[in-house]
Amino acid sequence: MSVKTKLKGILLDISGTLHINYTPLPNAVAALAKLRTTGVKIRFVTNSTKLTDELLFTKLIDMGFELDRTEIFSSLSAAKQEIKRRNYRPLLLLEDDALPQFSDIDQSEPHNAVVVGLAPSRLDYKHMNRAFQVLRSGAELVGIHRARYFASSERELSLGPGPFVTALEAASDKQAHLVGKPAKAFYQLALADMGLLDEPEAVAMVGDDVLADLGGGAQDLGLQRFLVRTGKYRSGDEHKAEVPLDGAFDSFAAMVHDLYP
């Protein structure tokens, strides 16, 4: 296929697009290496909240992917920026492996914010009820993202943080402020880092979630939007896009082969 505008930058989702759990998707490592040879700028944009950015970087390197630590833009980092900007003292519903990223944040009581990410060990009644009580006392609700589910294996989907954010919204009568994909500001951070903030039409967003990766800010900014049929993708997802996608491929490797034969 041909692209609308010659690509100068590519934003890559990670989980479900490049790998699932600790296993690279077929030919994904080689495809990324090939993409590097084209000269296109690459940033990795992820809603992963179970690991710090440092642990995520190490995980990708261990799987064989070639990248620089500074190329990772995570919703976890966006949440931290928001916490600092608003002087929040948050109650963090995050996994233990993600908490070190917030070690320099004041988390003392009384909390004035509740931050919710993908945290299977924290999203039980005890922790959710505590979050509800903090919200009822006047705290703000921050959803790192609202993904409904994620690919926990090649064949299975598991609940994402979205339903838990929605539950807290309904119970507390508060609207969550979302900081990760598909928030427009999140994509703008990555575009600015590539020096392409004024050329969004020359940047493609690649992901396996037609809404969380390719909707919202990706659509509003005019990015080229490419769906890969791996990870959380399910048959017919292409048709869920509010605006028609620019392309759909069987995998990230298939996309690179098609765009750069």
Image (cartoon, grey):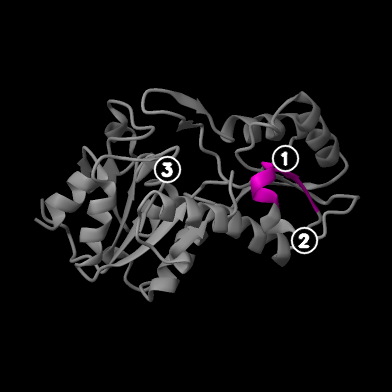
> Is residue 260 shown in magenta?
no
Question: For the residue marked with disc 2, what is the amino acid?
Answer: Ile
Kindly identify which numbered label has been placed on residue 105: 2
First along the sequence among labels 3 and 1: 3
First along the sequence among labels 2 and 1: 2
Instruction: Say which of marks 2 and 1 sits in front.
Output: 2
- Using the image as rendered, state which of residue 17 and residue 236 is in the foreground: 17
Instruction: Say which of marks 3 and 1 sits in front.
Output: 3
Question: For the residue marked with disc 1, what is the amino acid?
Answer: Lys
Separation (CA) of disc 2 from disc 3: 27 Å
- Residue 175 percent coordinates (x, y): 67, 42
Question: Residue tagged by mark 3?
Answer: 15
Mark 2, Cα crowd under 10 Å, few <14 / some 14-19 / many 20+, is some
Task: Give the quarter of the image for residue 23.
Answer: top left
- Residue 89 percent coordinates (x, y): 81, 56
Question: Residue tagged by mark 1?
Answer: 174
Q: Is residue 185 left or right of residue 14?
A: right
Describe the element under mark 1 as helix, strand or loop. loop
- Residue 123 percent coordinates (x, y): 69, 31
Describe the element under mark 3 as helix, strand or loop. loop
* Range shown magenta: 90-99
